[in-house]
């Protein structure tokens, strides 16, 4: 009998993904383990393999479809001797709301049997998921569009060229004329940026949010709303570290090259080892104090921010940390990290010093308790033993979840970190 190819769960937290690309077409023969499609998770692009030998009898989910739930049917595989007539799956003509899709993602589904969409009169509307998404983005009423696909199904070509200006004009005319002073109202009650821009006739270009940006936005919004942030700032002198780095790289003779950021990762890991109360996460029942310093490092990519992890960094030398970070950062920018390489971590480092940023405050990477924002090393006058001298000073800001780390704990962690930065030889022994 036909075999359902399901949307795989590529991480413990994955509930849905975007079917980015099909590498096989209907009617193509495939072998078990052969890559047939690519999907976008919340952090990377992954591959989907055929579950058995056979022929792709039907592609259920079109390329480009977002919010495909885990365990949802994406294609039907026919075994030897079977034909398309054996397929008994009716594909839903709509994409449910994110809340509904999240609920379905928690359920095992052997096939897709969703209620057909309809208009206000009860007439059924057949529309592909991609066409529905485009229509939603353009603000189009599907009941007014004539489909040219099978059984009158609305497809991408039917909506791609439709002009939504008429709808915008309709929205403008629907705005009541204000004759009295406006009453106070929450900001959330007003139009979003797209609605306001359309109403005011502002020109813009839409750049659709990918899964990475959506996930980062969701996680950081939750973090800022639920974790009570407070901030501690400290200055560290870098001159001894810069001199040691110069010596290490000189002796390496080009075989490897450690960066200031590698020293910072090591300094944070060593500080967490010597002062574990800062290596924590909050839960309602207990504070989790981690035994290893798994350092998440913020890396900017074309698709958005991702935080690959140097695990047990307190046990690794500078060269190992440097080589791991080069590999992780490179594959992060290519979207080739495995989920285990960016999920987890006990503490995050975000360094914008290479862009000339002197200081900034970062949002905590949940469920971690702390994130360290690192600025650029800047030469400035400092007073030592009553005399003014010039030193290279790096400003760092620790963002702390006050539920799990209080001010004294954060301050003591920063003292351990500062000592490691200003006396870097201690990290080598």
Image (cartoon, rainbow, N blue to C red):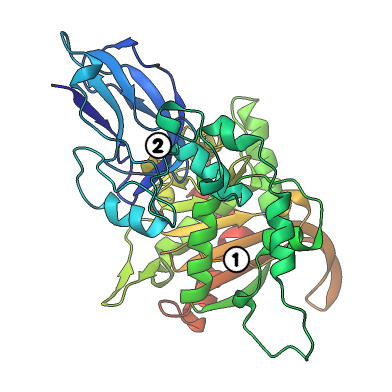
* Closer to the camera in the image, 84 or 356: 84
* Closer to the camera in the image, 149 or 335: 149
Position of residue 256 measured from the top left corner of the image (x, y, whole percent): 59, 29
Instruction: Please give the name of the residue rendered at 75% of the width and 57% of the height, measured from the top-left corner.
Output: 377
Q: Is residue 80 left or right of residue 169?
A: left
Q: Quadrant of residue 185?
A: bottom right
Judging by the rendered image, the residue that carries numbered circle 1 is: 418
Judging by the rendered image, the residue that carries numbered circle 2 is: 338
- Give the mark nearest the N terminus, 1 or 2: 2
Secondary structure beneath dot 2 equals loop
Q: Quadrant of residue 366?
A: bottom left
Q: Which quarter of the image is occupied by the N terminus?
A: top left
Position of residue 238 measured from the top left corner of the image (x, y, whole percent): 70, 57
Q: Is residue 185 left or right of residue 35?
A: right
Disc 2 crowd, CA 10 A, few/some/many (<14, 14-19, 20+): some
Residue extending furthest toward the left: 1
Q: CA distance from mark 1 to mark 2?
A: 33 Å
Residue depth check, mark 1 versus mark 2: number of the one nearer the observer: 2
Position of residue 100 measured from the top left corner of the image (x, y, whole percent): 34, 57
């Amino acid at each position: 009998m036909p075999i359902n190819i399901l949307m795989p769960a590529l991480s413990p937290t994955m509930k849905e993904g975007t079917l980015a690309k099909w590498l096989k077409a209907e009617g193509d023969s495939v072998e078990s383990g052969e890559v047939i499609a690519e999907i976008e998770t919340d952090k990377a692009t992954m591959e989907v393999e055929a579950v058995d030998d056979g022929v792709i009898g039907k592609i259920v989910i079109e390329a480009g479809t977002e919010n495909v739930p885990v365990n949802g049917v994406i294609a039907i595989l026919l075994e030897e001797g079977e034909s398309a007539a054996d397929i008994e799956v009716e594909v839903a003509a709509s994409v449910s709301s994110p809340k509904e899709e999240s609920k379905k993602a928690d359920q095992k589904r052997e096939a897709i049997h969703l209620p057909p969409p309809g208009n206000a009169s009860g007439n059924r509307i057949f529309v592909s998921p991609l066409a529905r998404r485009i229509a939603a983005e353009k603000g189009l009423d599907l009941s007014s569009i004539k489909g040219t696909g099978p059984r009158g199904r609305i497809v991408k070509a039917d909506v791609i060229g439709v002009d939504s200006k008429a709808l915008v004009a309709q929205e403008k005319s629907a705005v009541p004329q204000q004759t009295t002073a406006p009453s106070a109202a929450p900001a959330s009650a007003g139009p979003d940026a797209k609605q306001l821009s359309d109403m005011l006739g502002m020109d813009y270009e839409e750049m659709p949010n990918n899964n990475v940006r959506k996930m980062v936005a969701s996680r950081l919004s939750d973090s800022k709303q639920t974790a009570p942030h407070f901030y501690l700032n400290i200055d560290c002198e870098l001159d001894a570290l810069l001199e040691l780095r110069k010596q290490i790289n000189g002796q390496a003779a080009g075989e490897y090259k450690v960066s200031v950021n590698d020293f910072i990762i090591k300094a944070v890991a060593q500080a967490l080892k010597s002062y574990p109360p800062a290596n924590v996460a909050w839960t309602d029942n207990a504070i989790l104090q981690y035994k290893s310093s798994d350092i998440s490092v913020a890396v900017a990519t074309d698709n958005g921010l991702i935080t690959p992890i140097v695990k047990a960094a307190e046990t690794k030398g500078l060269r190992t940390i440097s080589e791991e970070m080069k590999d992780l950062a490179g594959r992060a920018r290519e979207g080739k990290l495995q989920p285990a390489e960016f999920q987890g971590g006990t503490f995050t480092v975000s360094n914008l010093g290479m862009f000339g940023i002197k200081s900034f405050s970062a949002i905590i990477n949940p469920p971690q308790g702390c994130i360290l924002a690192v600025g650029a090393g800047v030469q400035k006058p400092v007073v030592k033993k009553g005399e003014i001298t010039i030193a290279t000073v790096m400003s760092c800001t620790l963002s702390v979840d006050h539920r799990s780390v209080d001010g004294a704990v954060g301050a003591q962690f920063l003292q351990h970190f500062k000592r490691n930065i200003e006396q870097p030889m201690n990290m080598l022994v």
